[in-house]
Amino acid sequence: MRKKANGGLHRQPWRGRRRPLKTASKVAPIGRQDGARPGWRYYRPSLLALTAGGLLWAGGALLGRFNNDAGRLLARGLSNFVAFFSRLIPLPLSELCLFGAVLLILWLLVGGAVKGRGRGFLRGLCRVGALAIWTGALFTLLWGVHYQAPSLAQQLGLEVRPRSPEELTQTAQILLAQANELADQVPRDDQGAFLPDDFDSITEQINRQYEALGRQYPLYQTSLPRRAKRSILLRPLMPWVGIAGYYFPFTAEPTVGQTAPTHLAYNVAHELAHSLGVAPEDEAGFSAYLACIEAEDPGLRYSAALNGYIYASNALYRLSPELSSAVSSQANENLRRDIRALNEYLRQFEGPAQQAGNKINDVYLKSNNQPAGVRSYGDMVDLLIAYTLK
């Protein structure tokens, strides 16, 4: 610089190369350059989630197989933690989770396809896969390990073995006698239809029964009684696919759908048994019978006796229709009325949807170490005979 005549400074003009202008440049997405296909980094978060979920799932499965006591203890602890919060809300959170999962899957697939076209759909598919893997892993940790537990017969000290037709007939007669006696003691309306207690009262009574059973059998012990809930959104659909209730391990909620009045208490007890870690269907069914048959309320005892008799009668009918008919002819009028009402209720839901629901349930049961599938519901007859004739 040089001084001006008036003493000020005069700036020299810039000589040489011009200064480069700073302009904002467009940054290509990570892992690819413009016009190139996306690299593996584009899918890295989804692939990492898939891997982590798979490892967690494998760890839970190995824990359940090689150290089942520790696996079930962990599952009970996690379920109690979840149930501590979910039981405070009267609405079934399981239904919100199921509908939310459907919306999330659609958003991942459709939203990804719209935003990123082909590669976006593929990444969405990877995310859905990761979601499925994590769901399976959490299912195994919270619930699946219970399928590897010792049999209920072993834990209750019952002898389950092949039985003769005479023993099955004797069991059906004993259960029928119980149902006949209780059918005349339960409350009924002017038309003679059975009147069950309200849902919350039934749940409270059955929780007390499981608490009493827990003092005799450690299997039923729990530090946090569960709260059974009635289905709301899925309730109209469940009978059409042959589902009376379900246990949702992710929210630790036993949920009961629409059912016949005589079966309400039994179904509540069945789902509460699942919440206590009784996984196989035949064992949950027998646990429900065991909880209700010793209750003070005749309505609960009647629900247990009626269901027990129906199981034994159906098994006897498959063996000898003549013997089954001879036993059922001894049912009194009130019991006959309730069985007719049950058959009429079930008949209205027969159709392809129920057959499809039974097939799906059959696949689910067989995939969880129940080779008999939906027929495992009938295996509780062996437990009924062992308990009745002990």
Image (spheres, grey):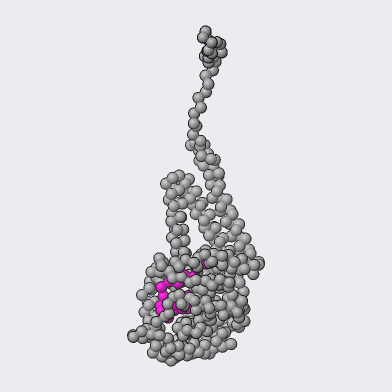
- In this rendering, the count of numbered labels is 0
Where are the magenta residues, as a range?
A: 252-268
Query: Residue 2 location in percent, x, y?
Result: 56, 11
- Location of residue 104 with respect to 81 vertically, above or below: above
Quarter where residue 92 is shown:
bottom left
Toward the right, the furthest residue is 66
- Location of residue 264 with respect to 67 vertically, above or below: below
In the depicted view, which residue is nearer to us: 346 or 20?
Answer: 20
Toward the front, the furthest residue is 6
Relative placement, left or right, of 53 versus 348 is right
Residue in the image at 39% along x and 89% along y: 333
Assign the C terminus to one quadrant of the image.
Answer: bottom right
Magenta span has 261? yes
Assign the N terminus to one quadrant of the image.
Answer: top right
Can residue 248 be spotted in the picture?
Answer: no
In the depicted view, which residue is nearer to us: 8 or 40?
Answer: 8
Query: Residue 265 location in percent, x, y?
Result: 46, 78
Query: Residue 39 location in percent, x, y?
Result: 54, 42
- Location of residue 111 with respect to 144 vertically, above or below: above
Can residue 198 be spotted in the picture?
Answer: yes
Query: Residue 267 location in percent, x, y?
Result: 47, 76
Magenta span has 353? no
Residue in the image at 46% along x and 51% along y: 108
Residue in the image at 39% along x and 76% along y: 346
Residue in the image at 53% along x and 40% along y: 30
Toward the left, the furthest residue is 191
Quarter where residue 160 is shown:
bottom right
